[in-house]
Amino acid sequence: MNATYRLLTLALVLSLTFAAGCSQGDTNQSGGESAESGESQQRMAPDFSVTTIQGNTVSLEETMAENKPMVVYFTASWCPICAKNWPVLSEVYPDYQDRLDFIAIGIDPTDTREVMTELAREENFTFPLTWGHPDIMLDFGVQAQATTVGISREGRVVFQRNKTALSEQQYRDLFDRLVN
């Protein structure tokens, strides 16, 4: 029964996500970012483990064991806002790769390993990427692609920017908040 409910929920979320598409602008439910009035009010990020297109494993548990913060970016190969963020992330990520872990997680089950590998090659991604894992999107409570989630060293969600194209400086400011 639980598996059926989860599958139906996944189908509904994906249907709504695809129907909404990638609209312009920031459509956070919270009006911009998650609450930041104290770590005690920040929710714990769900643990996950994925294999990147390069064959490496990335997990929240391992990141926390290394005492690093993490950024999770939910993406889709067909998303125009994501396409704006990819070059910015490719520019910013190398400057932070030793101080935080980053993973771009595909949310569309049709974004197979082959599709995402080709996309990464075409777009010259410098950041770790995995293929379609809509279940992780659901676990995080994320409702759309082009969502950036920052997780503290303690595993708490520090920020969540939904369906937003961010500038290089905006990403640097977010990343700095995690590593400092």
Image (cartoon, rainbow, N blue to C red):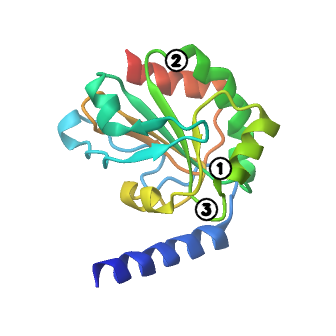
Locate the N terminus and report the quarter of the image it occupies. bottom left
Q: How far apart are the alpha carbons under marks 3 and 2?
A: 27 Å
Q: Mark 3 points at which residue?
A: 108
Q: Residue at x 58, y 14 (%)?
A: 95
Residue type, mark 2 in image: Tyr
Dot 2, crowdedness within 10 Å: few (<14), some or many (≥20)?
Answer: some
Quick check: can you spot residue 58?
A: yes
Judge left or right: residue 5 versus residue 112: left
The disc placed on residue 96 is 2
Q: Do the residues labelled 1 and 3 touch (CB within 8 Å)?
A: no
Residue type, mark 1 in image: Gly
Residue 83's spot in the image, x, y percent?
A: 74, 44
102 lies above or below 138: above
Residue type, mark 3 in image: Asp
Dot 3, crowdedness within 10 Å: few (<14), some or many (≥20)?
Answer: many
Who is closer to the viewer here, 31 or 72?
72
Which residue is farthest right? Answer: 122
Q: In which quarter of the image is residue 15?
A: bottom right
Name the secondary structure under disc 3: loop
The disc placed on residue 25 is 1
Q: How far apart are the alpha carbons under marks 1 and 3?
A: 21 Å
Who is closer to the viewer here, 39 or 76?
76
Residue 5's spot in the image, x, y percent?
A: 35, 81
